[in-house]
Amino acid sequence: MPPLSRRKFIAGSSLALIAADAAPQPGLHARARARGLFYGSAVNDDTLTNDPAVLGRIKAECGVLVGEAQFKWGDLRPDAKTFDFTRADALLAFATKSGLRMRGHTLLWHEGNPAWLEKTLTPANAEKLLVDHIRGVVGHWKGKLMHWDVVNEVIDSDDKQPLNLRKTLWQQALGARMLDIAYHTTAETDPSALRVINDYGTDYTLAWQDRKRGAMLDLLADLLHRKVPVQAVGLQAHLDGGEVTLDQKVLAKFVADIASMGLKVIVTELDVRDQRLPADIPSRDETVAAHARAWLDAVLSNRAVLGVLSWGISDRNTWLNGQFARADKLPQRALPLDAALNRTKLWSAIAASIDAAPVR
Ligand code: XIL
């Protein structure tokens, strides 16, 4: 049975079916590869264990995967002494079998942590806990992961901490040293994985995002000055299709400023929430696609950008319906495939933006 996306072009003729199958539109990763980029997606445990149809589409569209939760502390660390790699290893096995590469996400974050960590962490034991975790986790997959999001979401200037760091359990215990420890330990344990600092909220000319772009550039300058081995910035790109303050020049300048420091850039978690958009699907899809196209065009025009991952491949399974649910409770249309696994206008926008990117 051909996938739904092709079935709708068949129009009852088996000849048309053969023609459609003979010349399928290349997937996003194939198109990205032609520009020297990659395309990929986050995969969660539910999809991996229960949804072979989505896994099939992932193989058709992606070259890179990342665990939506499987590589976070909460999934890997039942207690302070034990590592449970079962779910993450299962995802890596699927990736390897399917010829896909994988990113690691993430080693230090203020969310996704086990309750025992929050209860146990003190200024006295924090360094050992962090070093042991990174040695254990990064070491387990040494040479097998292409990148590590070493730290995630460490900036929040509203918290009024030095270097605009977010006030978190790790920051309160170690201060900015958490970054030195995390990057040096990762570099020593697996020098081959590109070391990323990953964050959200640098997409628009909202006042807090203007501050956040500035804070990110200041933090990077400080880290590089102190020879902390960070190598790339992950732009999460959880976009808001209802936001009207996207300024391509500001965005392109931000990426250029990062690149001018000798750092790479990766779009790590692309999706477009549509909770502020009207219910009508064609107009929702149109706005979401145009929004993503504008954002991606500004970012992918810079050759320091290595590739794009979306936070899931299909609307069947997006975190947005939980945390950012629409008031009318309609499922969001935030990803390149809809819930029936048809390619959406957003898919076409991503494909077009990739096709238009300069070859690296
Ligand atoms: C989210 C997952 O999608 C959810 O399923 C989980 O419950 C919480 O984390 N930024 C990140 C990701 O860096 O790790 C988050 O993933 C989404 C926001």
Image (cartoon, helix red, strand yellow):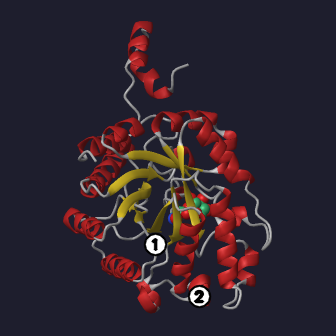
Answer with the quarter of the image where residue 79 lies.
bottom right
Q: Position of residue 145 (x, y in %)?
A: 56, 53
| Residue at the image point whose x is 68% and y is 40% from the top | 50
Q: Position of residue 116 (x, y in %)?
A: 76, 77
| Residue at the image point whose x is 27% and y is 69% from the top | 254
Q: Nearer the viewer, residue 106 or 8?
A: 106
Q: Amino acid at mark 2?
A: Leu
Q: Position of residue 81 (x, y in %)?
A: 80, 71
Q: Position of residue 98 (x, y in %)?
A: 58, 35
Instruction: Classify the position of ligand 1 by quadrant: top left, top right, bottom left or bottom right.
Output: bottom right
Q: Which mark is residue 174?
A: 2
Q: Alpha-carbon neighbours of circle 2 within 10 Å: few (<14), some, or many (≥20)?
A: some
**Does residue 197 appear in this view?**
yes
Q: Secondary structure at mark 2?
A: helix
- Residue under numbered circle 1: 229
* Tally of numbered discs: 2
- In the rendered image, the vertical position of residue 23 relative to residue 356, given as above or below: above
